[in-house]
Image (tube, rainbow, N blue to C red):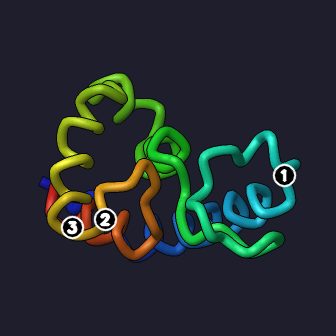
Amino acid sequence: TDPLLTPRREAKLRREWAAALDARARAPVELTEGAAEGTAEGAAPAGLPLRAAYVLLFTEEEREEMSFADFLGDAEPFLARHGDGADEISLQQALAFIEEMQ
């Protein structure tokens, strides 16, 4: 099978992820509710919510084959092993997740 994370796809994901983080950092506070306690006001978010990551990580066609619930079923245990088990995922965690899932 073809690798899921080609160099071209990774570069596109990095661009889209940076844009999503930037948009999230600029969003009004009520839209970013649930940010970790102790986050400095105006601090850039470190990760994206899992639903936003799901949309960026997978094409529309791939999302038709793997529901968000299926993604959570894989992502939550991965984050418990490789992160803090939060409702967010960093780009580095997302790339490692894709590599592990291929």
Q: What's the CA distance linking mark 2 and mark 3?
A: 19 Å
Q: Which residue is mark 3?
A: 99
Judging depth in this view, the residue of 49 and 71 nearest the camera is: 49
Residue 81 percent across, percent down from the top left: 15, 65
Q: Which residue is mark 2?
A: 84
Q: Which of pointers 1 and 3 indicates the residue nearer the eye?
A: 1
Judging depth in this view, the residue of 84 and 96 nearest the camera is: 84
Q: Check disc 2 and give the amino acid type.
A: Asp
Residue 41 percent across, percent down from the top left: 80, 70
Q: What's the CA distance linking mark 1 and mark 2?
A: 24 Å
Q: Do the numbered discs 2 and 3 sit on residues whose CB atoms are within 8 Å?
A: no
Q: Do the numbered discs 1 and 2 sit on residues whose CB atoms are within 8 Å?
A: no
Against 83, is 101 above or below?
Answer: above
Q: Say what secondary structure mark 3 lies in.
A: helix
Q: Which residue is mark 1?
A: 27
| Mark 2 crowdedness (10 Å alpha carbons): few <14, some 14-19, many ≥20 | few
For residue 58, which quarter of the picture? top left
Q: Which of pointers 2 and 3 indicates the residue nearer the eye?
A: 2
Q: Is residue 8 left or right of residue 27?
A: left
Q: Is residue 93 left or right of residue 79?
A: right
| Mark 3 crowdedness (10 Å alpha carbons): few <14, some 14-19, many ≥20 | few
Q: Residue at 16% of width from left, 50% of height from top? A: 77
User: Which comes sooner in the sequence, label 2 or label 3?
Assistant: 2
